[in-house]
Amino acid sequence: MHPRVFSFTLQAADGAARAGVFQTPHGPLFTPVFAPVGTQGTVKAVTPRDLVDLGASLILANTYHLYLRPGDELIRGLGGLHTFMAWDGPILTDSGGFQVWSLSAINQIDDEGVTFRSHLDGSLHRLTPERSMAIQQNLGADIIMCFDECTTPFDHQYNRIALERTHRWAERCRAAWTNPDRQALFGIVQGGIYDDLRRESARTLVGMDFPGYAIGGLSVGESKEDMHRILETVTPLLPEDKPRYLMGVGTIPDLINGVARGIDIFDCALPTRVARHGAALTRQGQITIRNATYTRDPAPVEEGCDCYTCQHFSRAYLRHLINSQEILAHILLSIHNLRALIRLAGDMRAAILEGRFTSFAAETLANYHSPKDEQGEPQ
Amino acid sequence: MHPRVFSFTLQAADGAARAGVFQTPHGPLFTPVFAPVGTQGTVKAVTPRDLVDLGASLILANTYHLYLRPGDELIRGLGGLHTFMAWDGPILTDSGGFQVWSLSAINQIDDEGVTFRSHLDGSLHRLTPERSMAIQQNLGADIIMCFDECTTPFDHQYNRIALERTHRWAERCRAAWTNPDRQALFGIVQGGIYDDLRRESARTLVGMDFPGYAIGGLSVGESKEDMHRILETVTPLLPEDKPRYLMGVGTIPDLINGVARGIDIFDCALPTRVARHGAALTRQGQITIRNATYTRDPAPVEEGCDCYTCQHFSRAYLRHLINSQEILAHILLSIHNLRALIRLAGDMRAAILEGRFTSFAAETLANYHSPKDEQGEPQ
């Protein structure tokens, strides 16, 4: 039987960790999955065919950026985002809410929506739940997100006000969602670092019955303890048969800790951003390839990595490219860093399916050194 | 019978135009051939596997740049340039002479060699014919070049002095050339825009019996008429059974006019440089994809082009990438522009083998509009 579009099949669980398949119009997503970020309709410095080669399945694009430039109507006129960026696999677009909060020059929030100035040219714009949905329909991603209010996670009183607005907006997004066979609309659990608000948010959104649920407002300055506790609070309240997406999270320990607490989908701009700063993500921790210690190092970026970069180039070559300000440095480090997280997601999936996730997670976390521990000469 | 290394087999001639095969330790070169330039050990913004995919066979790297950074000894220690940059095909290195003349802060020429300051840090360096050969041996390219004196092409008196030095240096390079089974040393015909000097240079170098001959000092400010006349003067004096390389030349009309006058090998940084400025090489002329006229254009960069870029992306998408300052713009336009010249070389080869080069050249030149004719809105 052909699987129903947007059905999520749980294939195995190992503690809270899950392995599953989420069916989309552009093919299945095998979870846990890490999605590279293609903010402006391109994963920075990587061609779509290199993304396929490094095992990417889901790509995220940013509604805020594409709405401002080149414009969602232009993209629709050229056949939608899949055709525009030549990506045949599943795409997820966010709602624009986070970028309005974090990037735009001015924003005024009222119960109807948000008024903001473009970070590009200062022009005045307005987003509402209905506008966000219309833009996301023009872009045509497989997974679209409810328009929510993003805010500081550390003010209980304001988070309650913002949360109630986010829930009303989720209802309006659901009402404006007209093509559930082509686009899956995910609700976003908010509530800052407060367990009571997070619980309330999860219950309210589950009551609206979305095809998937995201957890937003994390990795924005809170402690790892807060992040982990909130995941442990929220995921048990989410339905087992729907995918769970932790937004904007993407270090190696964060992915492991997220999967251990029941998360299925991740995205983060970290791997490509770190690459443009001349550094590499590895299971042992982040390494700064720019450092003089790698001047004559014939080793690949990461021993045992199967990516194109590690299979063909030395750290010494990459360091030379970085020092020479060559674009190929960005390309090759982006390929490695994306592969590092996608390979990790795949390894976690295999461990879950084989019932050995707990030991895999413990060993991998024990071997990992956070970037601040990094040894090496100063940059 | 296995072909002898560095043998050149002339397969067909059509007027002065030639199709042949040059055997190198890293595989055969089918001529006419266009070589992408990888100045610092990378063709800017293009991975080696994308170079293979777009049909590149020969890559040029710059001795001056690699000597200064990361250093030829370092590259030798890592297995040589082929291993360092992960390019398994043939590589050609220049001698450093042209960059010493065009890039370095100060240079003093004497009969022994050239003293110059690095364009990177002002440090003092000295190149001699013997040093250039030693550096090129460390790099390990398949084709290496004699160290010559580059100068303005418009001063007959000085060109005579420079030419005599270039010929003495060619003798010294030949004497310092110790591995003719692994590296083919090409002599470089100089002499500015002066037919008498060019003839003298060709005869002198042919007398030294090199495995190939380059024509240097063109495309440095002289008229097209001068360039064409000099090619017509020089190539008939070169042996039929040796490849002929026109250095640093790479527009579409220049390639056609070069092949029509008996040239086999070309290199130029133009395709990747033009790409980084948001423009594309096409058989109809150069087009500035950045222009507003392409905002909603669903067409590929060039109709009929078989490159990855033209097979998957619209001009509208590329314009969006350029406007958004995305690295993928450089990648995709570099792929197209390199393919444009490599495809042209291949089409010329086919036309020569089929005896229809004259009409191919006439038609292609008639359809081509030089960049200054380009229509479109100002950038």
Image (cartoon, coloured by chain):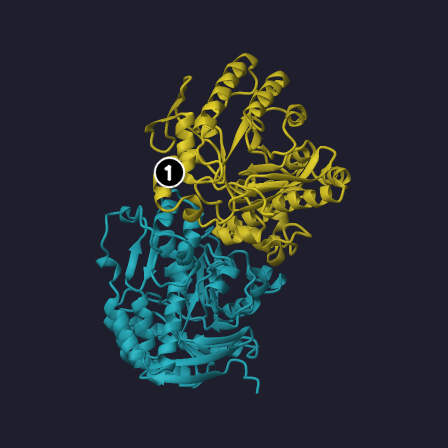
Chain colours: A yellow, B cyan
Q: Position of residue B103 (x, y in %)?
A: 40, 58
Amino acid type of the residue that numbered disc 1 sits on in the rendered structure: Asp
Question: Percent position (x, y) of residue A342?
Answer: 61, 45
Residue A330 x/y as whole percent: 51, 48
On screen, residue B73 above or below A128 = below
Q: Chain of mark 1?
A: A
Residue tagged 1: A72
Mark 1 crowdedness (10 Å alpha carbons): few <14, some 14-19, many ≥20: many
Count of numbered tags? 1
Side of A180 where A265 appears, left or right: right
Q: Residue furthest top?
A: A157
Looking at the picture, does residue A296 appear above or below residue B184?
A: above
Q: Which image quarter: residue A244? A: top right
Residue A42 picture location, percent across and down = 46, 45
**Quadrant hosting residue A22:** top right
Q: On screen, B43 above or below A178?
A: below
Residue closest to the eye, A363 or B71:
A363
B213 or A355: nearer the viewer: A355
Query: Considering depth in this image, is A26 or A85 the residue closer to the camera?
Result: A26
- What residue occupies the far front of the structure in this picture? A1
Is B21 placed above or below A128 here?
Answer: below
Camera-side residue: B305 or B147? B305
Q: Which secondary structure, mark 1?
A: helix
Residue at x-position 65% and y-position 32%: A240
Residue at 64%, 56% (x, y): give it: A298
Judged left or right of residue A159, residue A140 is left
Q: Where is residue B238, by image quadrant?
A: bottom left
**Residue B263 makes an appearance in the image:** no
The residue depicted at 35 percent of the width and 39 percent of the height is A73
Q: Furthest-bottom residue in view?
A: B1
